[in-house]
Amino acid sequence: MNTTDKPLHFLEQIIEKDLADGRFSSICTRFPPEPNGFLHVGHAKSICLNFGLAERFNGRCNLRFDDTNPEKEEQVYVDAIKADVRWLGFQWADDVRYASDYFDAFYEWALHLIRAGNAYVCELSAEKASEYRGWATRPGKDSPYRSRTVEENLDLFERMRAGEFDEGASVLRAKIDMTSPNMNMRDPILYRIRKQSHHQTGDKWCIYPSYDFAHGQEDAIEGVTHSICTLEFQDHKPLYDWLIENLPVPCKPRQYEFARLNLSYTVTSKRKLKQLVDQRVVSGWDDPRMPTISGMRRRGYTPSAIRQFCDMIGVTRSDGMVDVAMLEHAIRDDLNENAARAMAVLDPLKVVITNLPEGEVQEVIAAVHPNRPERGQRVLPFTREIFIDRSDFTEDTTLSRKKFKRLVLGEWVRLRNAYVIRADEVVKDESGTITEVRATLVPGTLGEKPSAEIRPRGVIHWVSAIHGRQAELRIYDRLFTHEVPDRGEDDFVTCVNSDSLRVVQAWIELSLTDAVAEQCFQFEREGYFVADRYDYTAQKPVFNLTISLKDTWKK
Ligand code: ATP
Ligand code: MG
C-alpha cells in the first residue's frame, strides 16, 4: 500500500489548508509521552502520526517528555522511550525536550495568572474540593479561598514553592467558572505540592504543574503548530485555549484530537501493562507477549510492519476496535517478503534412510528465499538419519491423499529441498510409541520428479540428525483469551491466557547457528521465528515464535 495514493486524512487536510492559507510557513508537531512506562502499540500510532506528518509536510517533530509527575516517572522509561522511537525509524528535531526544562517559565506564568486575578491558592481538602466541584449535571460552587487578594496569593504560592506546606495542604487553581458545564473549567488545578525528587530536576522543586497547566504551554514554548492528542482530551481543549489566551506565550498552538488505537485481545494502558510486569505475569516490559514496542521487537515484529499497520488503520475521529489479526497480517506480510527460509523440526521423529550409507553426507542446496534468488543459497547436509516432525507421519493407510498430504507407511513423500522417500517400516518401543521410521530414498529425485507410478503425497521438512543442532523455541500465543480484556467487568488479569508461552526443544538446520540476534526466519511449514534479542547464541540458539503462517484476517 502506498501512502501517497491514499486520500488525505482529516489532519493532513487541515495541515495542507493551513500551509496553503499561509497560516504557517512550516509545521511543528510533537510526541509527548509521560516517562511512566514503556510505549505500547497505541503510542506507535501516535508516533507514526506525529512524526509522519512532519515528514510528509517537511516540518519538525519534537520528542518531549511530559514529566510533570515525578512520583511515577523514571529515567529507565526515558531511555526506553527514546530507543523505541529510534527503532521505529524516526528522529526527533534537535535534542529531546522535557516539560521540566520549562518549570521556571511555568512558575513565572503562574505568578502572571495570580497577578491578573486569574489564579488562587486553595486549601480545600481533596474531598471537599471534589464536593465543591459538583458534577456534570450540577454546577459547582466557589471555594471559600477564591476571593483571596493578589498579595495573599503571591505570598502563599511563594511559600508553597519554598516547601512550607505539606503535600495536599494547598493547590494553585485557575479562577475560571465553577458553574461551567465543562468540569475542566471549574477552577482546575495548576500546581500541586509533591515533595518528591525528580529524575531531571532533582530536588529543585516541591511543587509540580498539572498536565493541563503544562501541556499547552510546552507546545507554545516549542512553537508547536498542531498539537495532536487522543479524543479523551477533547473536553480539555477549552482549558488549553483559555490558558494560551491568558498567558504571555510566544505562539498559539492549536489542539486537534484523533481516535486512540484500541486493539482486540490487547491491553493498551501503561498502568495495566505495569500491573502485568509488577505481578510477574510476564517477564518484563519487553516480554515478547507484551504489546509494548520493545515487546513486539523482541517477538520479531519489524519497524516496517508496525508502520505499515499504522498506515492501514488510518486516522479518524471515531473510536473503534481494530482486529489484532490486522497487526498480525502486517507482520506476516513483511516476513513473507523478507524473512530467510530455514527448517526446524519441533517434535522430532527419527527417519533412517536405509539405502544411504552411514557416514555419507550429501550436500543439498536450498534457496534462502524462494522468490529472491539474489539472497543466495544455503547448503543442507543430507544424511542417513534425519528428523521429521512426528505429526508428519502416520501408519494409518486409510487416510485420503487430500486429508493427509504427508508421509504414510508404505507411501512416498518429498523431503523439502531433497529426495522423495518411501516409508517402509516402523520401530516401536514397549509402550507402542514409534521411535523410528525406516525408509528408502528414490534415487534420481533430487530436484527431479519421480516416475509416474511414484506419487508423493506432499512435501515435508526435515533436519539432519547428525548435523542438525538443538535449539530452544519459545512458542508464544496471544496474552489474553478475551477479545476485550479490559472491558471492566472482571479484573483484566483473569483473562490472561495460561498457555501463552510453551517452550520446546527443537532440531534446527545447522545454518541457523550462524544467525544474529533479532534475525527473522520462516521455519518452513511452522511459522516465523526470530533469534532472541538477548538469549540467542550460536552454542545455545533461542528463537521466539513471531507469528504462525496462517493468516486469519479477512480483508
Ligand atoms: P496510557 O493510557 O497507556 O498511560 P497515556 O496517554 O497516558 O497512555 P502518554 O505517555 O501520555 O500515555 O501518551 C503519549 C501520547 O501517546 C499522547 O499524545 C497520547 O494521546 C498518545 N496515545 C496514548 N495511547 C494511545 C493509543 N492507544 N492510541 C493512540 N495514541 C495514544
Ligand atoms: Mg497520559
Image (cartoon, grey):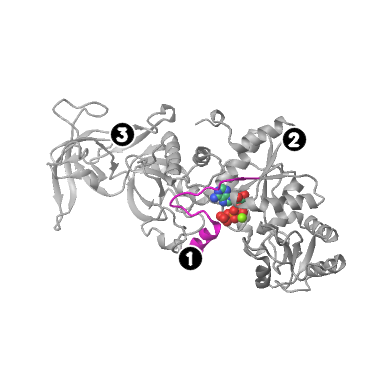
Q: Which residue sits at x=47%, y=49%?
A: 263
Q: Would you name the residue on which mark 3 appears? A: 363
**Which label lies toward us, 2 or 1?**
2
* Residue 23 - label: 2
- Quadrant showing the C terminus: top left
How many callouts does the rendering have?
Answer: 3
Report x, y in % for residue 432.
Answer: 14, 55
Disc 2 marks a residue whose amino acid type is Arg
The front one of 8 and 356 is 8
The front one of 127 and 137 is 137
The front one of 544 and 267 is 267
Question: Circles 3 and 2: CB distance less than 8 Å?
Answer: no
Report x, y in % for residue 245.
Answer: 78, 49
Q: How far apart are marks 3 and 2 (CA)?
A: 68 Å
**Residue 198 sits in which quadrant?**
bottom right
**Residue 377 sits in which quadrant?**
top left
**Residue 365 sits in which quadrant?**
top left
Sooner in the amino-acid sequence: mark 3 or mark 2: 2
Report x, y in % for residue 82.
Answer: 62, 49
Left or right of 60, for residue 351 = left
Sooner in the amino-acid sequence: mark 3 or mark 1: 1
Left or right of 412, for residue 469 = right
Q: How crowded is mark 2: few (under 14 residues within 10 Å), some or many (20 or more)?
A: few
Compared with residue 375, is residue 116 higher up or lower down, i.e. above or below? below
* Residue 279 - label: 1
Disc 3 marks a residue whose amino acid type is Glu
Q: Residues within 10 Å of mark 1 (few under 14, many from 20)?
A: few
Q: What element carries label 3?
A: strand
Disc 1 marks a residue whose amino acid type is Gln
**Which label lies toward us, 3 or 1?**
1
Q: Is residue 9 magenta?
A: no
Q: Is residue 272 magenta?
A: yes
